[in-house]
Amino acid sequence: MHVVIFSVVLVGHSNCGGVGHCYDVVKDEQQAKSQPNGPILRWLTPLINLVRDLGVISLPKPEAMSIIANENVKMQVCQATLLEVHVEAHYVGC
């Protein structure tokens, strides 16, 4: 059986708790070092790295969170285009 998927929608939302937490972790690097290396932190690591790369820590948190959320969606779109199923679909002309 094959499932046909025509669209994948990637979205972000305002006041995201994950984005806020990642901002706080980067803002206070001491906190980042003391965080347990659990599954949630591993899941958030790419977002924490994005926050570091964006250099938005000097901005007020609400402004930074908006930028981070937008850039995270862009990053996820890029990641989705690398998935094998996406590459195969475009290769066969879907």
Image (spheres, helix red, strand yellow):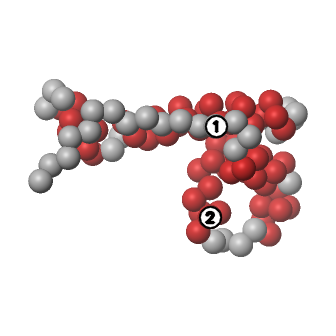
Q: Nearer the viewer, residue 5 or 50?
A: 5
Residue type for callout 2: Ile
Q: Nearer the viewer, residue 40 or 7?
A: 7
Local secondary structure at mark 1 = loop
The residue under label 2 is 40
Place residue 64 in its image quadrant: top right
For marks 1 and 2, give the one nearer the viewer: 1
**Residues under labels 1 and 2: Cα distance?**
19 Å
Q: Is residue 16 visible?
A: yes
Residue density around tag 2, few if under 14, some if 14–19, many if 20 or more, within 10 Å: few
Q: Position of residue 13 (x, y in %)?
A: 64, 37
Q: Position of residue 79 (x, y in %)?
A: 43, 41
Q: Is residue 84 above or below residue 43?
A: above
Q: Is residue 26 visible?
A: no
Place residue 6 in its image quadrant: top left
Q: Is residue 18 above or below residue 62?
A: below
Left or right position of 60 against 64: right
User: Quadrant of the image for the C terminus?
Assistant: top left
Q: Position of residue 12 (x, y in %)?
A: 59, 37
Left or right position of 29 against 82: right
Place residue 40 in its image quadrant: bottom right
**Which residue is painted at 57% across and 59% down in the image?**
43
Q: Is residue 7 above or below residue 37?
A: above
Q: Is residue 26 above or below residue 88?
A: below
**What number of labels is visible?**
2
The residue under label 1 is 13
Mark 1 or mark 2: whose residue is earlier in sequence? 1
Residue type for callout 1: His
